[in-house]
Amino acid sequence: MPGKKVLLVIAPKNFRDEELFHTKEELEKAGFQTSIASSSLSEAVGMLGGKAKPEILLEKAKAEDFDAVAFIGGGGAASYFNNRFALSLAQKFYNAGKITAAICIAPVILANAGLLNGKKATSFPSEENALEDKGAAFTGNPVEADGLIVTAEGPKAARDFGKKIAQLLK
């Protein structure tokens, strides 16, 4: 466990504050290091006004440098639904046998990367069809883990999302 690192991917604007900050808190409380990646290194602003400073450009993030990735939701996450760097990053983590996670609307990134076909998954209710269209078995649970894929439905599930990732990393 010591030295394990989790990459948190946020949109440059309109990420969901609780999904970043509560997830990050739970991971750090469990002893993991976190880093934030985004498509811009400028200060990112959440939907509720929270601010975060990305340390890594999305296109420069490498799966081999981390033990898990979590794509954070909020309206801005839609900018990554078909972003080649986001889709490739998700595939690289998954193919390397690492935890690949997403919360709120961000599980669509995993679905579009081809990772949810035949997997149990959850998301914000608005994205149920997008997940099912890519072969996911939508559960609607607050947090869902299927192998190394972890998905969660939204802000209220953020702490449990962080705890589930931490549990799997141990």
Image (cartoon, rainbow, N blue to C red):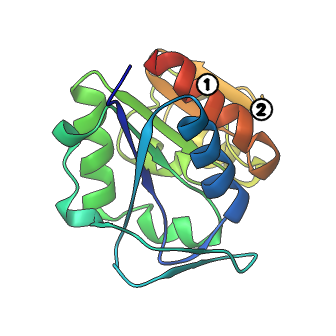
Seen from the viewer's position, the closer of residues 74 and 66 is 66
Seen from the viewer's position, the closer of residues 22 and 132 is 22
Seen from the viewer's position, the closer of residues 117 and 31 is 31
Quarter of the image holding residue 66? top left
Q: Is residue 133 visible?
A: no
Query: Would residue 80 appear left or right of 88 to someone viewing this image?
Result: right
Q: Which residue is situated farthest in the right direction here?
A: 156
Say which quadrant the N terminus sits in: top left
Q: Position of residue 82 (x, y in %)?
A: 37, 63
**Element assignment for label 1:** helix
Q: Position of residue 59 (x, y in %)?
A: 21, 65
Query: Would residue 26 appear left or right of 64 to someone viewing this image?
Result: right
Q: Amino acid at mark 1?
A: Lys
- How would you rate the neighbour count of disc 2 (Cα within 10 Å): few for under 14, some for 14-19, many for 20 or more? some
**Element assignment for label 2:** loop
- What is the count of numbered marks? 2
Q: Is residue 61 above or below residue 48?
A: above
| Residue carrying label 2 | 140
The numbered mark, 2 or 1, whose residue comes first in the sequence reads 2
Going 50% across and 17% down the picture, which residue do you hit?
Answer: 168
Q: Position of residue 76 (x, y in %)?
A: 56, 72
Q: Amino acid at mark 2?
A: Gly
Quarter of the image holding residue 26? top right
Contact, mark 2 vs mark 1 (Cβ under 8 Å):
no
| Residue carrying label 1 | 164
Distance of label 2 from label 1 (alpha carbons): 16 Å
Q: Position of residue 100 (x, y in %)?
A: 41, 34
Q: Is residue 154 visible?
A: yes
